[in-house]
Image (spheres, rainbow, N blue to C red):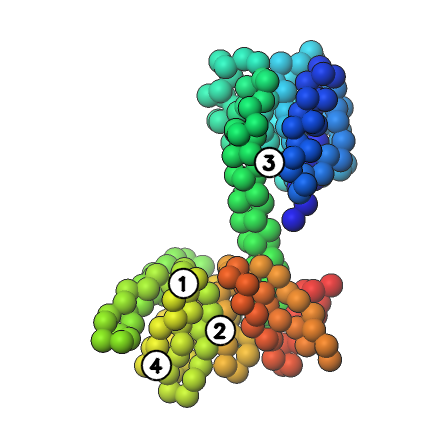
Amino acid sequence: MTIRTILVDDEKLAIQGLMLRLQAFPDVEIIDTCSNGREAIRKIKTEKPDLVFLDIQMPGFDGFSVVKGVMEIEPPLIVFVTAYQEHAVRAFEANAVNYLMKPVDEDKLADTLERVRLRLAEKRSAEEAEKLKNVLAEVAPDAMEAMPDEGEPAAARYERLINIKDKGQIFRVDVDSIERIEAAGDYMVIYTADNSLILRETMKDLERRLDPRVFQRVHRSWIVNLNQVRQVKPHTNGECFLVLESGADVKVSRSYRDVVARFVH
C-alpha cells in the first residue's frame, strides 16, 4: 500500500530534511511539496493525497487554516510538524494523526507512519466493505428484507455474542471477531482470526441471528463478514475470490459472479 504524501512548509531546509528522513520508508511516495498554505489547499484538493505533513507557523494561511480549507472535501490524514510546542492541544483537536517537533525524531516518525498505515487500512477496508455490501445486496433480496426498520436500531435485532459449545467448553464469541462461516452439513465452522469452532446449527438459522448488512452469504457454503474483506481478486473463468484480513480466500459462487465483477472493476 503506497502512502501518497504532500509536504507543506515555508522553510525549504525543513522540507529537504523531512524528505531525507522519509527515504527510509519505501511505502511513502512524496507526490508534491508546498511552501505556503494557499498552495497547499489547492494541491490537496486536486491531487487528493493520503497524507500531509503540515507546518503550522506559515505566513498567510497557517496549518490550521489549511485544514479548515480542505474540509469541504474528504480531507487527508494530517501530521503537524512544528517548532512550537504550544500548538499541540489544538493540533489534536483538529484530529491530527500526530504532532511532531522539529527536528523530527526518526523513532517518532516511524511510530507516526505506523499509525497512518493503520488508519488508511481501516478506511480502505471500510470503503471496500461498503461497496461490496451494495453490490451483494442486489443478489440477496431476502437479506435486505430482513434488515431492521428505520426506527429500530440494528443492534437491537441481531446478536452481539454467540455462545458456542465446542470441545467440551463454552466459548462466548463476539460476532465482530468472526471472519467467515463455513457450512458443513448440519453444523457450522466459525472462523475468527486465531481460532475455529464448531457450531451445531444450520446456516439458515444462524443467518437469522446475524446482521445481514455485515454478514453476507457469497456461496452456498460460505458467509463472510464484509468488514473483514480486504480485496476482491479476479480468478480464471470469470470467477473471483474475496481476500480477507487474515489472508484467507473465499470463493464467490457463480450466482454472485456478475455483480461482484462490477465491484472489481
Between residues 139 and 75, which one lies in front from this camera angle? 75
Vertical side of 30 occupied by 133: above or below: below
Q: Name the kind of residue labelled 1 in the image.
A: Asp
* Residue 164, position as x, y percentages in the image: 29, 72
Which residue does the numbered mark 2 point to in the structure image? 223
Cα gap from disc 4 to disc 3, whole angstroms: 44 Å
Which residue does the numbered mark 1 point to in the structure image? 194
Which residue does the numbered mark 4 point to in the structure image? 201
Q: Residues within 10 Å of mark 4 (few under 14, many from 20)?
A: some
Mark 1 or 2 closer to N-term? 1
Q: Residue shown at 72%/22% (left/top)?
A: 16
Which residue does the numbered mark 3 point to in the structure image? 77
Q: Does dot 2 land on a helix, a strand or a loop?
A: strand
Q: Does dot 3 land on a helix, a strand or a loop?
A: strand
Mark 1 or 4 closer to N-term? 1
Q: Residue shown at 46%/21% (left/top)?
A: 89
Between residues 142 and 53, which one lies in front from this camera angle? 53
* Residue 183, position as x, y percentages in the image: 44, 81
Going by the image, does 130 lie left or right of 13? Answer: left
Mark 1 or 3 closer to N-term? 3
Q: Name the kind of residue labelled 3 in the image.
A: Leu
